[in-house]
Amino acid sequence: MKVHEFTCITCPIGCGLEVTEVTKPEGTTYQVDGNTCKRGEKYAIDELTNPLRMVTTTVQIEGAHLRRIPVKTLEPIPKGEIMACMTELNDVVLEAPVDCGEVIVASVCGTEVPMVTTRSIERV
Amino acid sequence: MKADLVIIGGGPAGLAAAIEAYENGVESILVLERDRELGGILQQCIHNGFGLHRFKEELTGPEYAERFIENMKEKNIEYKLDTMVLDVTEEKLVTAVNTADGLIQIAAKAVVLAMGCLERTRGAINIPGTRASGVFTAGTAQRYVNMEGYMVGKDVVIVGSGDIGLVMARRMKLEGANVHAVVELMPYSGGLARNIVQCLNDYDIPLLLSHTVTEVRGKERVEEIVIQKVDEAMNLIPGTEQTIQCDTLLLSVGLIPENELSKKANIVLNPLTNGPDVNESMETSVPGIFACGNVVHVHDLVDWVTEESCRAGRSAARYVKETLKSGTGSLNTVPSSGVRYVVPQYIEPENIDTNKLTLMFRTDSVYENARIVLMNNGEKIKTVKKRHMAPAEMESIVLKEKDLAKMSRGEVTVKIEVEEAVRS
Ligand SMILES: Cc1cc2nc3c(=O)[nH]c(=O)nc-3n(C[C@H](O)[C@H](O)[C@H](O)COP(=O)(O)OP(=O)(O)OC[C@H]3O[C@@H](n4cnc5c(N)ncnc54)[C@H](O)[C@@H]3O)c2cc1C
Ligand code: SF4
């Protein structure tokens, strides 16, 4: 039996949640306490079993009035892959002009989630 | 030069006001922006979380801005970049300067002020110590890192746990810096729980509550800082000093509406918001000069900036067409117990064209299970139950036609009635 603590971020109330993980031969069960509504339970179990995060960062761009262009993962990726995602993007250099929503990496860190630009930029 | 409407500032507030004024029949519009592009502060806010209310989807700052920029360009609304507005008069004569046109003067029928806000600096919070380099406001650092491509430092401490401080803690960490701590004077964070979890906890960045920075040390560059605990009365607790070695200190210690131009136009400013007093139409004390966005009061959600700015744009159009009743109206709003300020400060019910008016306000502390109570001349008009309220999250209460019908000339008071106050 293991107890994990989280703060629910689904709404601004921010309930403190406790998840009791019980491993039995027939499978693992999760008991969530501290949540005020159903959404807290789902949040806690997702955070424990498969935490996902959007990554928003920038990559290098040439031929524009700025040296960086903002990008994001189109879908959230596993939390554990965030740093690998950052490293993968270190080598990406774009050339202006670029449209908003252009795919710059088709599958970031083998997650099948594409990385896209989040603004358009003209050539100068 | 002449224009029906001049808008000062091309951030989300200015863009929404321009689009809405155009849609309400004003064609001669000129937007003046001192930066080299439109979008304002949103262009550097590359994280997501914008637009949930407005577009029902989660956008990054630049994506949110781009929707409005595209819309404005489709309408061929005129704008000038790299153009700094120097002066506005009560007669609505706008003076600006840029390298292409030199000094320009525009006689406007109406003006919308949308200059945004400024960050409080080290001077404003008085951190003693040397004048070493490496001390930045968080917003300046955000611009360097996210747009200009300069890393501001390797070993970072952040002062202030509002959302901007939290977002920058994660940003610096992702870009390879060591973020040693976020230091917060208050016993609770000024940021959203979501940002505490996803910006600090995810990266094991410590949040030091009830702490402050008492000294910056270092000759050329910051070498270390001293932090110290404070007690409930905000007094330093002797013997709790700690030094942290770092080369960079980021300050996220508050924003102040940018109102140098408003003062030049003799607009009445509100001591609680530091922005102009406005009425239901977002009109200032000078008829025909409107204001919206962070210039009026500091917003945490750009969605509300947009809503407020649409109102300003629509009202400016009515002013140009001479269908708006200017002035302080028949009602004035007053913040009472638990409420720091209320916007708008004045209401003329006759001008309300959408059957309802949203009053925006901030509480003075964290409340759980409380009620927002709206009174008019001592009579209760409306009560709204709230599970949770905090100073960092702007609150609102909607006045419907039937609420307005119940009111008579005089004060409209907004207060919080508590069952239990926590963490205050
Ligand atoms: C660092 C930071 C992070 C934020 N993060 C979030 C977030 O995560 N989520 C969220 O919803 N909101 C966030 N906000 C809030 C939101 O971005 C702002 O509320 C919104 O951008 C305010 O819009 P604005 O148009 O009033 O001001 P701004 O965006 O600041 O625009 C003002 C514009 O006016 C121009 N200007 C000023 N003076 C002059 C002059 N004299 N002449 C010509 N032009 C002038 C400026 O250059 C600027 O472009 C953040 C704000 C800041 C400061
Ligand atoms: S459990 Fe429900 S009420 Fe509590 S923070 Fe999560 S979503 Fe909000």
Image (cartoon, coloured by chain):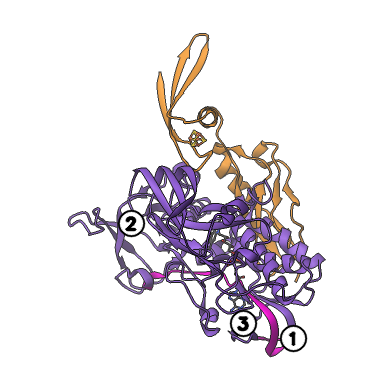
Looking at the rendered structure, the secondary structure element under dot 3 is strand
Within 8 Å of ligand 1, the CB of disc 1? no
Q: Amino acid at mark 2?
A: Leu
Dot 2 alpha-carbon crowd within 10 angstroms: few under 14, some 14 to 19, many 20 or more = many
Whether residue A83 sits left or right of residue B18 in the image: it is left
Q: Quadrant of ligand 1?
A: bottom right
Q: Which label is found at residue B185?
A: 2
Within 8 Å of ligand 1, the CB of disc 3? yes
Chain designation of label 1: B
Q: Which label is found at residue A108?
A: none
Whether residue B103 sits left or right of residue A49 in the image: it is right
Q: Which residue is mark 3?
A: B85
Residue B258: image x %, image y %? 52, 73
* Callout 2 and callout 1 share a chain: yes
Q: Colour of chain B?
A: purple
- The answer to whether B342 is drawn above or below residue B199 in the figure is below
Q: Earlier in the sequence, mark 1 or mark 3?
A: 1
Chain identifier, orange in the render = A
- Residues A47 and B311: in front is B311
- The residue drawn where x is 55% and y is 62% is B145
Q: Is residue A105 magenta?
A: no
Q: Which label is found at residue B2?
A: 1
Residue B202: image x %, image y %? 48, 42
Chain designation of label 2: B
- Dominant secondary structure of the residues highlighted in magenta in the image: strand
Which residues lie in the magenta part?
Answer: B97-123
- The answer to whether B283 is drawn above or below residue A57 in the figure is below
Q: Earlier in the sequence, mark 3 or mark 2?
A: 3
Whether residue A16 sits left or right of residue B328 in the image: it is left
